[in-house]
Amino acid sequence: MDMHELTRELCEGNESKIVVLVADGLGGLPLEPGGKTELESAATPNMDALAVTGILGGSIPVKPGITPGSGPGHLGLFGYDPLKYRIGRGALEATGIGFELQPGDVAARGNFCTLDTDGNISDRRAGRLPTAESTLLAERLNEIKIEGTEVIVLPVREHRFVVVFRGPASGDLALGDRVNDTDPQSTGIPPLPPEGRDKPSQRTAKIAVQFVAAAGELLADERQANGLTLRGFAERPNLPTYEDVYGLKSAAIAVYPMYKGLARLVGMDIVGEAKTLDEQMDVLRDIYDQYDFFFLHYKYTDSTGEDGAFGEKVKKIEAFDAAVPSAIALNPSVLIITGDHSTPSFLRSHSWHSVPTLLASAACRPDRCTEFSESACVQGGLGQFEAKYLMLLAMANAGRLGKFGA
Amino acid sequence: MDMHELTRELCEGNESKIVVLVADGLGGLPLEPGGKTELESAATPNMDALAVTGILGGSIPVKPGITPGSGPGHLGLFGYDPLKYRIGRGALEATGIGFELQPGDVAARGNFCTLDTDGNISDRRAGRLPTAESTLLAERLNEIKIEGTEVIVLPVREHRFVVVFRGPASGDLALGDRVNDTDPQSTGIPPLPPEGRDKPSQRTAKIAVQFVAAAGELLADERQANGLTLRGFAERPNLPTYEDVYGLKSAAIAVYPMYKGLARLVGMDIVGEAKTLDEQMDVLRDIYDQYDFFFLHYKYTDSTGEDGAFGEKVKKIEAFDAAVPSAIALNPSVLIITGDHSTPSFLRSHSWHSVPTLLASAACRPDRCTEFSESACVQGGLGQFEAKYLMLLAMANAGRLGKFGA
C-alpha cells in the first residue's frame, strides 16, 4: 500500500507546527581510523541539548548502500519514495535554475560542443566556454521558433544550458519524454539524432530535430560552440502535494534555486528571499503563523563536504547549530534536524551512509543519547530507518495522524 | 523497483576487490539465561580487531522471525530477495549433490519406499536402506528410457535420490514443474499419481507416470525398496548473474557441493578443490588477481550447531577466526564476515535470529563496537538489516555504485 493513501486516510488537522531543518550532506566520516566525524568534531551545544530530550536515529536516504543525488535525497525526506518518484535530469536541471516546469513541458539538459568540419564532435564541452559567453549563446537560441511549440532556452553555467519544449498539458498533441540522449558520450562521431520511443515522444523528437538544425545555423560561425547535444529529456514529475497527502500548508525557506524548486514540486510555497541562515530564521519567524509545516534548507554542510574541506564543514555545522535556538524559540510541536544524505569530506562526494537525525516533540520517546553525532544516532531510539518514513513520524508526533483501523 | 534494476543502472567498474567470508550458521544463543553465545564464548582476536575499525550489524536472512534453509539463506546474502526467487526442492537437491541443472530440466526429489502386496506404502523410507544399496538402485533406474526425454537418476543418501527429466530448453515441448508430490505423507495408501497443473507440467507428469511404472518393474523383486515417491518437482531457478546485476567477475571457494551449486546458480565460477579452510585461503590468494568478488563458505559452524555441540561450534569459530588474517593480508577493498543464518546449538537447527555481520572498508563509518559478537552487533552502525541489502553495502563501500539520480 502506498504510504500516501494511508496518510490521506489518517491525517487530521490541528494547530501544530512542524519545523524541519535540513543541513544538506550533514553526515560524515572520520578522516582516519579512530577519528571523529565532522559533526562529532563540531561544538554543537544546542543540538546536543535537544538530543537529551529528543530521539535520535539514522536516516537511510534510499536503501542501504544507495547514494542519492539531491533530487532523490529530498524526495525521501519529503516522504516520497525516491524509487517510485523519479525526477529526470532535464527536469532537475530546470528546477535547479529556478525555472518552474508546467504540465506539458519537456526539458532537456543541453551542452554546447565543438564540431569539426565533418560534423563530428571534437570537444563535448566546447572548451568549457565561459558562462558569460554561453549565456549570450543561450539567449540567441531562445529566438528559435518552432511551429506549434514554445521553445525556451535557459543558460546554466559554462557549456551547459536547458531547453524546454512547451507542448499542450494533455491531449492528442502532448509531448513525451522518452527520447534518447543525442550526446554520444565520445568524440570523433557526430551527435546522435533524437528519436522517440512512443508516439508522444516522437513528436518531441521531431521538435528536437528542428531545434538542433536551427541552432546549427545560428551557431555556425562560432569557433568553439558551433554545435550542441541534448540529454535527459524529462517531463515535470507528477508528485502529489503536501496539502493532498498530509493536509499541510507548507513553506520552504531555501537560498538556492534547486531546493526551492524541489519544494515547489511537492506544492510548498517558496517564501522569503533570505541569503543567509540568519535571514532564513527571520523568514521562519515572520511566516510562522501562516503555515503548518516549514522546510528550511542549509547548503554549506554539503558544499564544504564536496570540497573535502573537513575543517570548513565543521565550522558550517557550528554555524548551523548556532541558528537552532531561533527555531526552538518558536516552540514548534515537532522539530526535526537532519540532512538529505551524507557528504563526508573524506569522500568529497555524496554518500550512502545514514544521516544523523534528531526529532524533538512533547510525545517523542527519548532515548539515552546525550549528543547529536553519528555514533549517538546509531544508539538512537529511531534506529536506522528509510528517510521516506520521517514524515510519518513528524505527522504522528504532531498529533496529525489518526488511528489506523479500529 | 527491483534492486537489480537499480544496481544494473548504477554499477561502475573499478579495481576494487570484495571478499565475503561466510561462516554458515554463525549466529547462536546462550545455553542459559545470562550466558554467552558460541561466538561470544570463542576467542576471536582477529575479528574483534576488525570490529574496532569496521562497522557491525545484524543481518536478517529473510524477514524477522523467518528461518531460512540454505537456499534462501544464501540467496539473501547474494543479494537476491529470497521471497522473490525460490529454489524448488528438486532443484536444491540436485544442486546439493553437485549436479548442474540446465534450462529445460525438471528435477524431483525421490524416496525409495516399501509397498505392500496391495500397492500401499508400508514404509515411506524403505527402512532407510544403506546408501551403498540405494546407490546401486539409483544406477539401475538410470537405465530407464523414455521417448523424447532424457532421464537422469542420481543417488543421494539412504533412501533419497534425485531424478531429472531433461526436456527442451524452450518451445512447445518444454516441461513444466507444477506437478504434485506423489508422496502422500502417510502409509497404508498407494503413492499419488503425478498430475500437471498446466500444459507443460502435464507433459512432465506424463513422463513421471512412465518413469514410476518402469521403476516399478525394475524394483519389483526388491524386499524393501520396491517402490518410490517423487516430490518437489522444480525447474532450474532463473537467477540473473553477478556479472549482469553487479558487473562483478565472481568466484566461489566452497568445500561442499550445495554451496558450490548455489554460487553457480548466480553465475559465480567455482574455483579450486580445497578441502580445508587453509586450502580455501590458499585458493583465495591464488585466484585473487583474476576476480572482483570472492565468496568463501565455511560449513562447520553450522554442522556443529545442528549437532547441538556448543563447545565444538566454539572451536570451529576459533578456527575460522584464525584464518581471517589470510584474507586481511590480501588487503581487500571490502571485507565482510557474516553467515547465511544462525544455527544456535541450543536449538540444534537453523533459526530466524539475525546474523552477526562485520563490514570493513576505508569508507565504512566505524561504530563504537570493539568485539565481534551478537551483543555488539545489536549496537552496530548497520543496525538490523535484511540480508538482501548486504551486496548493496558491499558495492557502495567498494566504490562500485554511482549516484542515484541527479
Image (cartoon, coloured by chain):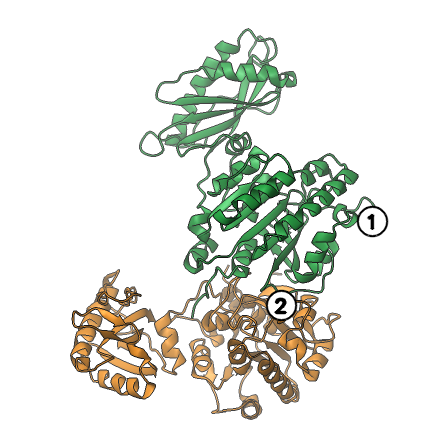
Chain colours: A orange, B green
Amino acid type of the residue that numbered disc 1 sits on in the rendered structure: Gly
Quick one: quadrant of the C terminus of chain B?
A: bottom left
Query: What residue is pinned by disc 1?
Result: B35
Chain bearing mark 1: B
- The image quadrant that residue A207 belongs to is bottom left
Q: What separation in Å lies between label 2 and label 1 (alpha carbons)?
A: 31 Å
Tell me if A254 is positioned left or right of A143 in this view: right
Of residue A136 and residue B277, the one placed in the foreground of this image is B277
Of residue B284 and residue A395, the one placed in the foreground of this image is B284
Residue A157 image position (x, y, % from top left): 35, 82
Of residue B69 and residue A109, the one placed in the foreground of this image is A109
Chain bearing mark 2: A
Q: Residue at x 38, y 82 (%)?
A: A97
Quick one: quadrant of the N terminus of chain B?
A: bottom left
Numbered circle sitting on residue A58: 2
The answer to whether residue A283 is above or below residue B379 is below
Question: Crowdedness of circle 2 by 10 Å Cα count: few (<14), some, many (20+)?
Answer: many
Amino acid type of the residue that numbered disc 2 sits on in the rendered structure: Gly
Q: Residue at x 43, y 21 (%)?
A: B151
The residue most toward the top is B221
Kind of element beneath mark 1: loop
Question: Crowdedness of circle 1 by 10 Å Cα count: few (<14), some, many (20+)?
Answer: few
- The image quadrant that residue A84 belongs to is bottom left
Q: Residue at x 70, y 83 (%)?
A: A45
